[in-house]
Image (cartoon, rainbow, N blue to C red):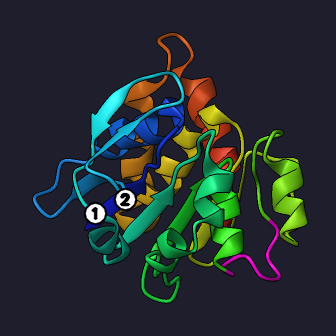
Amino acid sequence: MHIAILTFEGFNELDSLIAYAILNRIRRPDWRVSIASPAARVTSMNGLVIDSQIDLQQACAADAVIVGSGMRTREVVADEALMAQLRLDPARQLLAAQCSGTLVLAKLGLLDGVAACTDLTSKPWVQEAGVQVLDQPLFARDNVATAGGCLASTYLAAWVIARLVGLDEARQALHYVAPVGEKAQYLAGAMAAIGPYL
């Protein structure tokens, strides 16, 4: 299983890197998680520079794709050449989006008739794209999930793990990262968020 995290210039570190870390808790020979970007190197909204591991073409062939957010997402969706490279298909892969990443899925026509989650800043942009925005951390229909709020990236990662390898593995991954002394409560909250969509 290959999971690609789309990470654009101006990306939000919490969205891309928290998901990356949690998804990498799965230890299977066929499990791979990659940061994907249109450029070889991208800089976050706070100045962190990271190297891309795969390009967008490789990302579009992955079993699951998470679209991260960032401060330049509106520039991404306005770039016709870039958007044309994003050949995502919920019939053959899991698709997930975090915060302003929801706008990318909306502009690709992958949220037609489907409500979605996003952060408060991105909410009006997603609504302008014709998508009903829900006041909750995660929503999924079939193979498409969206999450709102930076720390909802944990839920999105858990949803991907649960869908690809199982709920027990998702619980174990979240248990590892949950705060000490709060692990039971944290897991209960996370399972309440993703459980209805599994």
Report whether 154 appears left or right of 56. right
Query: Residue 70 at x, y = what percent?
Result: 59, 41
Query: Residue 143 at x, y = what percent?
Result: 56, 76
Residue name at image x 35 percent, y 67 percent: 56
Rendered position, 44 above or below 153:
above
Residue name at image x 79 percent, y 76 percent: 114
Is 157 or 6 nearer to us in this picture? 6
Count of marks placed on residues: 2
Is 64 or 174 nearer to us in this picture? 64
Disc on the earlier residue, 2 or 1: 2
Q: Report which quarter residue 17 is drawn in.
A: top left
Query: Residue 127 at x, y = what percent?
Result: 89, 62
Rendered position, 154 above or below 60:
above
Is 88 or 128 nearer to us in this picture? 128
Rendered position, 76 above or below 43:
below
Amino acid identity at mark 2 = Pro
Report whether 179 appears left or right of 113. left
Report whether 28 appears left or right of 152. left
- For disc 1, the neighbor class at 10 Å (few under 14, some 14 to 19, many from 20) is some
Amino acid identity at mark 1 = Asp
Secondary structure under tag 2 reads: loop
Name the mark on residue 55: 1
Give the alpha-carbon distance from disc 2 to disc 1, as whole Å.
6 Å
- The residue range painted magenta reads 109-115
Q: Are marks 2 and 1 in contact (CB under 8 Å)?
A: yes
